[in-house]
Amino acid sequence: MAENIKARLYVESDLRVGQEITLDRDQGHYLVNVMRARGGEYVGLFNGRDGEWLAEIVRTGKGRADLRVRENIAPQITEPDLWYLFAPIKKARLDYMVQKATELGVSLLRPVRTMRTNLDRLRQDKISKNAIEAAEQCERMTVPEVMPMVTLEELLDGWPEDRLIMFCDEAGAEDQNAFPVGKALDEVDAWQGRPEKWAILIGPEGGFTESERHLIRSRAHVVPVTLGPRILRADTAAIVAIALWQSFRGDWQ
């Protein structure tokens, strides 16, 4: 049946056998006008809680589709508890970064305004939509939560005590207190066991200022790491950092 699924869609409603769901305008347009779906065909549905379900298209109209949930086809799977904290960058690269972070399995996205951040405003709903579309396409069963933008100081002052921050310090390659990711995580395990709650912090174009680096490193829950000898663009650094964390501590092991 999987090969007959016309599309895979995220919905917020609960999923159970026999339930009827009317897709919102954007999803209805996508399914009917873009994918050319018709009555009697099937889609996959997920909501981040109830696993994945097969649903039949029972009615279509102009940019509208009504579905009836038929059966559960996969149990719920959750990703590791990994937050991704980033300084906003230009739109096209921001969209790319959100897509890739979602595909790589982060559980939360949070923009952070720094001294060198070029964007003062972000459309939180646009980021959420981008993350949903990426989750639909990469077959994950959850969508990362998207939080509003905060300043770096607000982020650190309100930080939960039970979560560590893997701070990707672009100057770390020259700093004896910043280790490659694998070694840094092993060091943490040696004195804290194997903590499961993590966040990854990536800086803006141009990097953090010296005062920001000092502020970040002054916090007890921060683990400075280096991503190697080359200076990476923010979107590249995001992919590298998340992939390395997933390899050493996430669900790629």
Image (cartoon, rainbow, N blue to C red):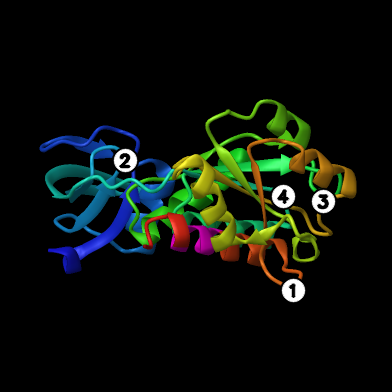
Whether residues under marks 3 and 2 lie with C-beta atoms below 8 angstroms apart, the answer is no
Which residue, given by chain and number where applicable, does mark 3 sit on? 208
Between the C-alphas of marks 1 and 2, the distance is 40 Å
Please tell me whether residue 30 belongs to the stretch shown in magenta: no
Instruction: Name the N-terminal-most of marks 2 and 4.
Output: 2
The residue at 56%/52% (across/down) is 187
The front one of 1 and 158 is 158
**Residue type at tag 4:** Pro
The front one of 197 and 108 is 197
Magenta segment's dominant SS is helix
Nearer the observer: mark 4 or 1; the answer is: 1
Residue 62 showing in the rendered view: no
- Residue 88, numbered circle: 4
Q: Where does residue 52 sit, x and y in percent of width and height?
A: 23, 48
Between the C-alphas of marks 3 and 4, the distance is 13 Å
Stretch of the chain drawn in magenta:
242-247
Residue 78 showing in the rendered view: yes
